[in-house]
Amino acid sequence: MTVKRRPTPARADGRATRWAGQRERRRKEFVDAALAAITEHGPDVSTQQIADKAGVPRTRLYRHFSGKADLASAIAERVIEQVVVELDPVWNPRGTPMEMIELAVRTHVTWMAEHEAIYQYVINVSGAAGVSAYHDVKVAVSGHIAALFREYLQVAGGDTTAAEPAAYGLVGFVDAATNRWLENPTEQTREELIRKLVDWAWLLISDTAAKGGLKLDPDQRLPTTEELRARRTER
């Protein structure tokens, strides 16, 4: 009697890992195709147009996604990754306060303007999942700015309770103003909008800092919290 040998767990796991990696690679390729299709056809792009851009039948597309909602969710996740990368100035502050503000505002407005169709797709087509994903990014950015505010205000001996409302208000304001401009961009140029948003953001930030006992110079390098602590110790 001949007994068939079962594959060893290691070999089985190896095949499973390779298959999972290949499936993930194909999903990324399809998401790339979807982003290109959205850019070309707008936020109302059809699944067939996405499949055409990927060069595969629509049925093959759904071998890698459980349905339209799954595809939309994957697209939303990719967009969020892009936004997080683009907002590096927020995660890694450096330079003068004015340079940091301008870089962050310019990055946000530019991304929104140059990827409007993709943004609208995430918000409108992907439904609650897309809205939640974009909301999560705004919360993450706001939370990070609030943490920076709180850290600096604490070192200055000021009222740290202003940190969170100031940060969330700032992010919400810039985002809402940019969205409104996208609806009617003829009233002012992108550069004019950026300039105004930078000025208004500086007013909020400098006022919040000043009331917390921290005077900021817009054109001088922002000192680290360690440097601020050292200065207070020397006094």
Image: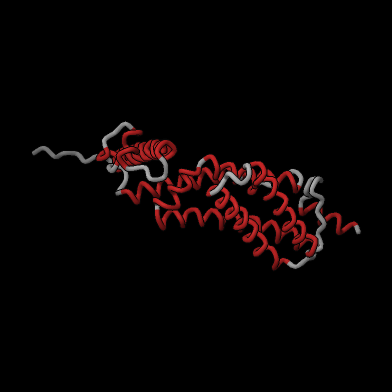
| Residue beneath the point at 56% across and 55% down | 138
- In the current view of this chain or complex, which residue is farthest to the top? 55
In this view, the residue in front, 25 or 5, is: 25
**Percent coordinates x, y for residue 6 in the rendering:** 21, 41
Tell me how the rendering is colored: secondary structure
- In the current view of this chain or complex, which residue is farthest to the right? 235
In this view, the residue in front, 114 or 81, is: 114
185 sits to left or right of 17? right
**Percent coordinates x, y for residue 142 in the rendering:** 61, 57
**Relative to 61, residue 171 above or below:** below
Is residue 24 something one can see in this rendering? yes
**Percent coordinates x, y for residue 235 in the rendering:** 91, 59
| Residue beneath the point at 53% across and 49% down | 183
Is residue 13 something one can see in this rendering? no
| Residue beneath the point at 60% across and 58% down | 172
- In the current view of this chain or complex, which residue is farthest to the front? 187
159 sits to left or right of 186? right
In this view, the residue in front, 79 or 22, is: 79
Q: Quadrant of residue 157?
A: bottom right
- In the current view of this chain or complex, which residue is farthest to the left? 1
**Percent coordinates x, y for residue 143 in the rendering:** 61, 58
